Amino acid sequence: MIEFHLDTRSGVAPYLQIARQVQQALRMGTLQADDQLPTVREVVGKLAINPNTVLKAYRELEREGLVAGRPGQGTFVVGTPAGPPPGAYTRLRGGLVRWLRDAHAAGLDDESIVAFVTTTLRDSAEESAA
Amino acid sequence: MIEFHLDTRSGVAPYLQIARQVQQALRMGTLQADDQLPTVREVVGKLAINPNTVLKAYRELEREGLVAGRPGQGTFVVGTPAGPPPGAYTRLRGGLVRWLRDAHAAGLDDESIVAFVTTTLRDSAEESAA
DNA sequence: TCTATTGTCTTATAGAACTAAGACAATCAG
DNA sequence: CTGATTGTCTTAGTTCTATAAGACAATAGA
């Protein structure tokens, strides 16, 4: 069962964070067809947010055709988004973990790391465009 | 002169994106004391947003003691946030670029990459906590 | 001094997001 | 059938964010 995490400092709407964590779990293969998502009330209990916020996330995912709610049962995974090969992540993870350890050792906190990745991503995109 | 980029799909408020890009440039050493930020009107011209949005970002940075506005001149860097060694980033960049190339080759798009880094960051934090 | 540039401020409007509190219908276990 | 669980829906209100349009004071340069 997937567990959700909210980063209140990120500035991203909670319902978006939940939806994206599901999308990413689908891409990574952590979630597969027929897997069940936590019930709305379970999420509410763990994250201390409003049921409507969870509902909005699940409806968004339903709108994308990724999950389907079954009244009386819960919300289940329907399909997986078109994406990269399922096993790709396990191989990449090792290299990333090693680099993250390096970055931490250099004194970067998590926020700096994500920002650094984002800007480097943009920079290299501009490079290859030039 | 720093250039700002907005990601409308990120769900993060534009004023927060601008403020964070300045903070990160300060951490990386891209911006230093007495450097000038783009004028409010320059940013408005490039990003097609409201002056008040830029103003809000600059006020936030001013509140943090990072920059100061000088009427008639512009907004300038005052101090740098307590952070990691300035040269740390240049060394880390190489390894990151290599890993990003790998990730792209595996079929991951930018959004997946950032999500992957975020979750790996959280996972490894939980690991070391356990 | 005069003018253009710049930061700063005000007021009003609109939209998105989250919360609050409650209700209903479908499903499953007993 | 009955009760508990679950997804779904409604209405209302608050806060945050962004926009719009305009005005003022300080500064630098001609």
Image: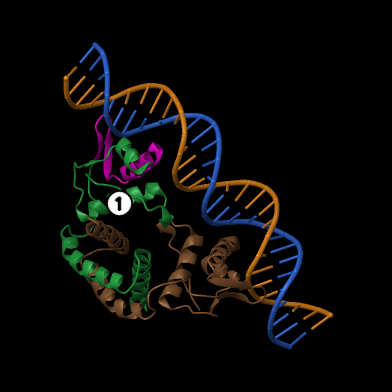
Chain colours: A brown, B green, C blue, D orange
- Taking the magenta stretch, the answer to whether it contains residue B57 is yes
A19 w.r.t. B58: above or below:
below
Tell me if residue A50 can be seen.
yes
Q: How many residues crowd mark 1 within 10 Å: few (<14), some (14–19), many (20+)?
A: some
- Residue A57 at what x, y percent from top left? 54, 64
Front residue (pair B73, A65): A65
B123 w.r.t. D16: above or below:
below
Q: Chain of mark 1?
A: B
Which residue is painted at 28% across and 75% down in the image? A97
Q: Provide the residue span drawn in magenta.
A: B49-76
Which residue is painted at 43% across and 70% down in the image? A24
Q: Say which element carries label 1.
A: helix
Total numbered labels placed on residues in the image: 1
Left or right of B49? Residue B65 is left
- Residue D27 at what x, y percent from top left? 22, 26
Image quarter in which the C terminus of chain B is found: bottom left
Which residue is painted at 42% across and 50% down in the image? B13
Which residue is painted at 34% across and 70% down in the image? B108
Front residue (pair A84, B84): A84
For the residue marked with disc 1, what is the amino acid?
Gln
- Residue A4 at what x, y percent from top left? 48, 70
Left or right of A92? Residue C22 is right
- Taking the magenta stretch, the answer to whether it contains residue B115 is no
The residue to which callout 1 is attached is B21
Image quarter in which the N terminus of chain B is found: top left
